Image: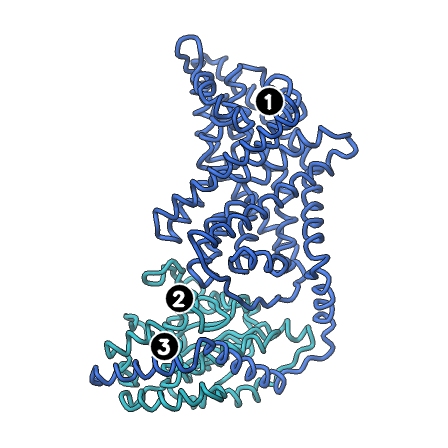
Chain colours: A cyan, B blue
């Protein structure tokens, strides 16, 4: 599943809701160095591009814009599977600062899958114009991952973003991703299933997500469990 | 590497737990995600004096209300068409006059230097004339309609349309998001077909793909607007003409939407059986339209793009029509022979043989149908060249025997018939199935024939013709 990366030092996934300026961030970072194709076996466009930071080459993969990672739609399936199986070195989630609540739904789901997340809090200018203030330091602490405020349209904050990403991929940033507060029967079911998965794959960083996907009948995750490829996610290749 | 047996244990345990949890697992998960996001939002985000959001909410209470939502939508649509109809007439005539003057000069020049008549005819009266017609008929309405349409799009109105339409699609057993792909279809049916990717369920997505063609795309709007202007508009008093024309185009759009719903309902109760799934549609804030972007998008991306494509298609079509008129078998031109053969078919559905011929020639691009009809007429009867849109109605009604019925059937046929070649190709790419692509192309054609046949015969029965 892992994409071959010749001459690429780090691979960065770009996730986010539609209309958050995700494409603007993508274009601003990669400029002319991009190319588009299709996701393997899918009719959905896959755009990727490179940028340089401190002499390292980063490849940015633009995931389809989605509100969630749970449904069976092709777009969400691609985004979900890439973050899980593609194992990017870092996932940047672009968040619309004018509607944080809606965008947090996606962030919380991404944090279940990976702890290497940088949040790009975009459209800060529009939020300011509408009298919205965000305590992004407090929110970052609560979510356990860095948040970088940006106005990608005017190139503001993008240097901070690439710096935050470089700190993440080099391991300088410690993360303590917030996990969902799950209660009731679902929580009981997870308590049963997660230890079984962890018994087999000790280092799996997202065993709870894998369990959730299994309970939801996710075909790709079942397959990965059957053919053992889920073991590759267990930290072995880093 | 773990033993495969252990994986099977995990899976069977997962299946067991899944059954115990029941079907609403995802709903519970979504609930806890929403709760969490809500808590974080309240704690870290403060909104001071968000008058805009208050204004948005107040606006949405009216625009998406059960009572006013739909009437407002159709009123807005009517206003757009009215402005287009009123504004496009004069420039259309002027462009036609200018371009046909060039044709005369070019042909005269060719004749004066002794170029054979058939080269002059092929180039000036065929290829060039096709392009000139398309430009005259399409450019002015597009240059007015597209900026207005893009304005509403930029404002954030289209998701409201989806919101208003949701309950109807639910009734039809289709996905509410189909209202969005349908709205995209007003721009371009191929784009509408691609937009169905937002629909999760393959069943509902297929319904949305197969019915997208029933809303008129940007290529077909100029045709509808022109027909409405010169036929329906002139059938009433001059003062009411532009209102009647705009109202007619709105009627056609409503018929298109109703057809979409009926066909969706039919499909979801027969070959594509199933329940409608629910979804959350967040209404994005209204955005102040950016005039520069509207002009760029509507003029460059839409008007010139559509016009370019139409001109590319019209050039060979014009040449083909000229050839059909120039080549004689016996003492009749091919145009006459073919259109005579097609006459009974055309007559049965309220049209005539020439119109059917023009439709066959225009399969690659719906937007060139009207120019193709005009050229085929002038080829079939060698009638005097039309120099402006003003005389068009008189000539079609006087010489070709068009009636209001012809115009109505032509509009219905244009609305319902098979999608253009680009849309068919896109359907094939998106479904990956020859069968469904064929259904997507032939079902609308069959519906168009049946509807026009019924309308024509009922009309004749009632009118006693």
Which residue is at 56% across, 83% downward? Answer: B35
Q: CA distance from mark 3 to mark 1?
A: 66 Å
Dot in front, 2 or 3: 3
Q: Position of residue B459 (x, y in %)?
A: 62, 29
Q: Is residue A209 above or below residue B106?
A: below
Q: CA distance from mark 2 to mark 3?
A: 20 Å
Q: Quadrant of the N terminus of chain B?
A: bottom left
Dot in front, 3 or 1: 3
Q: Is residue B18 above or below residue B428?
A: below
Number of numbered discs visible in the structure rendering: 3
* Dots 2, 3 in contact, CB < 8 A: no
Furthest toward the right, the residue is B239
Q: Nearer the viewer, residue A50 or B199?
A: B199
> Which residue corresponds to mark 3?
A84
> Which residue corresponds to mark 2?
A49
Quadrant in which residue A49 is drawn? bottom left
Quadrant in which residue B102 is drawn? top right
Furthest toward the top, the residue is B331
Query: Helix or strand or loop: what does disc 3 sit on?
Result: helix
Q: CA distance from mark 1 to mark 2?
A: 52 Å
Which residue is at 57% across, 89% downward? Answer: A138
Q: Position of residue A11 (x, y in %)?
A: 36, 74
Q: Position of residue A64 (x, y in %)?
A: 44, 66
Q: Position of residue B251 (x, y in %)?
A: 65, 42
**Residue neighbourhood size for the residue with mark 2, other residues' Cα within 10 Å, grouped as few (<14), some (14–19), many (≥20):** many
Image-based side of A4 in relation to B243, left or right:
left
Chain letter of disc 1 in the image: B
């Amino acid at each position: 599943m892992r994409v071959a990366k010749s001459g690429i030092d780090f691979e960065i996934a770009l996730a986010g809701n539609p209309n958050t300026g995700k494409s603007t961030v993508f274009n601003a970072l990669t400029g002319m160095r991009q190319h588009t194709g299709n996701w393997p076996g899918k009719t959905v466009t896959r755009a990727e591009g490179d940028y340089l930071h401190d002499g390292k080459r980063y490849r940015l993969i633009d995931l389809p814009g989605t509100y969630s990672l749970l449904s069976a739609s092709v777009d969400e399936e691609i985004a979900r599977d890439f973050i899980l199986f593609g194992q990017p070195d870092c996932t940047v989630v672009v968040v619309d600062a004018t509607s944080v609540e809606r965008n947090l739904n996606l962030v919380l789901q991404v944090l279940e899958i990976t702890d290497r997340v940088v949040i790009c809090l975009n459209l800060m200018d529009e939020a300011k114009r509408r009298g919205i203030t965000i305590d992004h330091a407090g929110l970052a602490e609560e979510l356990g991952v860095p948040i970088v405020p940006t106005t990608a349209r005017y190139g503001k904050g993008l240097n901070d973003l690439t710096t935050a990403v470089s700190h993440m991929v080099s391991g300088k940033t410690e993360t303590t991703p917030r996990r969902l507060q799950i209660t009731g029967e679902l929580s009981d079911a997870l308590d049963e299933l997660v230890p079984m998965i962890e018994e087999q794959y000790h280092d799996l960083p997202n065993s709870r997500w894998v369990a959730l996907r299994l309970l939801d009948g996710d075909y790709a995750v079942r397959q990965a469990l059957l053919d053992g490829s889920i073991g590759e996610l267990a930290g072995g290749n880093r | 590497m773990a033993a495969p047996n252990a994986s099977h244990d995990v899976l069977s345990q997962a299946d067991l737990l899944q059954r115990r949890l029941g079907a609403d697992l995802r709903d519970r998960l979504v609930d806890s995600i929403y709760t969490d996001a809500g808590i974080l939002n309240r704690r870290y985000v403060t909104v001071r004096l968000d008058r805009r959001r208050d204004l948005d909410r107040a606006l949405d209470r009216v625009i998406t209300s059960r009572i006013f939502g739909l009437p407002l939508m159709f009123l807005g649509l009517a206003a757009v068409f009215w402005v287009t109809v009123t504004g496009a007439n004069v420039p259309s005539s002027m462009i036609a006059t200018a371009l046909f003057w060039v044709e005369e000069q070019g042909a005269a020049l060719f004749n004066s230097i002794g170029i054979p008549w058939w080269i002059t005819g092929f180039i000036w009266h065929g290829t060039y004339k096709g392009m000139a017609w398309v430009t005259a008929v399409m450019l002015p309405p597009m240059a007015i309609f597209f900026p207005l349409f893009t304005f509403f799009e930029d404002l954030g109105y289209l998701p409201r349309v989806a919101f208003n339409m949701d309950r109807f699609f639910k009734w039809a057993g289709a996905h509410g998001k189909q209202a969005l792909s349908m709205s995209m279809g007003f721009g371009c049916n191929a784009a509408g077909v691609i937009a169905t990717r937002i629909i999760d369920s393959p069943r509902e997505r297929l319904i949305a793909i197969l019915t997208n063609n029933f809303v008129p795309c940007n290529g077909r709007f100029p045709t509808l607007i022109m027909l409405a202007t010169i036929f329906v508009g002139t059938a009433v008093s001059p003062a009411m003409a532009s209102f009647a024309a705009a109202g007619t185009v709105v009627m056609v759009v409503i018929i298109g939407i109703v057809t979409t719903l009926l066909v969706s309902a039919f499909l979801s109760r027969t070959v594509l059986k199933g329940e409608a799934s629910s979804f959350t549609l967040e209404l994005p804030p209204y955005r102040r339209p950016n005039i520069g972007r509207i002009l760029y998008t509507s003029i460059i991306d839409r008007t010139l793009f559509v016009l370019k494509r139409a001109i590319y298609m019209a050039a060979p079509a014009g040449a083909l029509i000229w050839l059909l008129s120039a080549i004689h078998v016996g003492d009749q031109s091919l145009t006459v022979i073919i259109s005579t053969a097609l006459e009974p078919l055309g007559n049965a559905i309220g049209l005539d043989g020439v119109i059917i011929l023009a439709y066959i020639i225009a399969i690659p691009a719906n937007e060139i149908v009207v120019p193709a009809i005009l050229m085929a007429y002038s080829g079939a009867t060698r009638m005097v060249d039309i120099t402006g849109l003003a005389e068009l109605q008189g000539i079609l009604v006087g010489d070709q025997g068009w009636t209001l019925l012809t115009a109505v059937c032509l509009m219905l046929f244009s609305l319902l018939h098979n999608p253009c070649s680009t849309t068919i190709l896109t359907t094939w790419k998106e479904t990956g199935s020859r069968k469904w692509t064929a259904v997507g192309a032939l079902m609308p054609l069959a519906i168009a024939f049946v509807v026009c046949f019924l309308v024509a015969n009922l009309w004749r029965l009632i009118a006693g013709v």
